[in-house]
Amino acid sequence: MRVAVIISSLLGWPLLHDLLGQGVVAGVAVPATATPEAERVAHLLEQAGVAPVPLTRPALAPQLTDWLAALQPTAVLVLTFPWRIPAAVLGLPPQGFINFHFAALPGYRGPEPTFWQIRRGEPAGAVTVHRMAADFDTGPVLVAVPVPIGPHDTHGLHRAQLALAGVGAARHLLAGLRGETPLPEHPQDETAARYWPRPTLADLCIDWQEPAERIARLIQAANPWNRGALAVLRGQELRVLAATVRPETVAAPPGTVVLAAPGQALLVACGGGHVLQLDIVCLDEGYFTGGQLASMGVPVGEILGTLLATQPA
């Protein structure tokens, strides 16, 4: 059995590397985009001695048709892809197109589910393998591998865990396609389905009126891909990459610095009197600990703002 692979993200690289080692890859295709991640994927493929076929959005259907006619794969495995596969192409391989969605389905459809799962405090994500249908992230599920989200996991940490879990999910899938193990198809429950769009600026801004725990989850969900969650310090953009929820409560307006110990800590009041310790922040001048921020002259009583509140209407 041989499979073709479409890949556009480093999320799929450990999986593809394992498939290449097994000798089951008939060919690889990538979107012809010049994003930094696409360039890194192309570099890894070059190191592995693989020359991928570039795909363009306007000519996607004929390009895929010609590619599959030349390769004759059993199935096409899609390891993240930014464009909708034309419905007329999905049935060309004997086992169709099979997508690896790096989140739980059907509750977390969409292009950036990891952010939303961490932001909402989900205890686990998943690698969900499903047959592709005409609409994004639909079609029956073949394999689902839960991946825990630890209380301190950032977007980057969970993404790495998902990438590794994809290897086992792919091996399970291939065994099923070969008939070595059962591979039941479970229809997705459309009543539980939800599509999550890419986060907007509003989704990435800290609202100090929120409880500290919710703000901490936003910070984890935005680290490292957005270089943290967004706030304002003296009119300058402040990005918070790591923070710790403190047990004490205070009677201070949200956003107020309530402790500024140079070299040690910087604490900020949040909604409901909760307190958040800023551990790592980013300014134009560089990355600093909260204690370093205090050493730079941020005092008790300083008010940290919300970025959206400073944007022109």
Image (cartoon, rainbow, N blue to C red):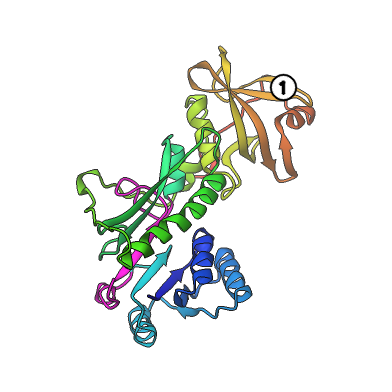
Q: Is residue 213 magenta?
A: no
Q: Is residue 8 left or right of residue 72?
A: right
Please name the residue shown 28% across and 58% down the image: 183
Q: Report the magenta residues as a range.
A: 85-112
> Residue 250, percent across and down?
57, 13
> Residue 184, percent across and down?
25, 56
Kindly report the secondary structure that dominates the magenta region of the rendered protein.
Answer: loop
Residue assigned mark 1: 260
Please name the residue shown 29% across and 71% down the image: 96
Above or below: residue 104 compared with residue 11: above
Nearer the observer, 274 or 21: 21
Above or below: residue 257 compared with residue 73: above
Please name the residue shown 36% across and 61% down the image: 173
> Residue 149, percent across and down?
48, 39
Q: Is residue 99 magenta?
A: yes
Kind of residue at disc 1: Ala
Nearer the observer, 84 or 283: 84
Nearer the observer, 302 or 43: 43
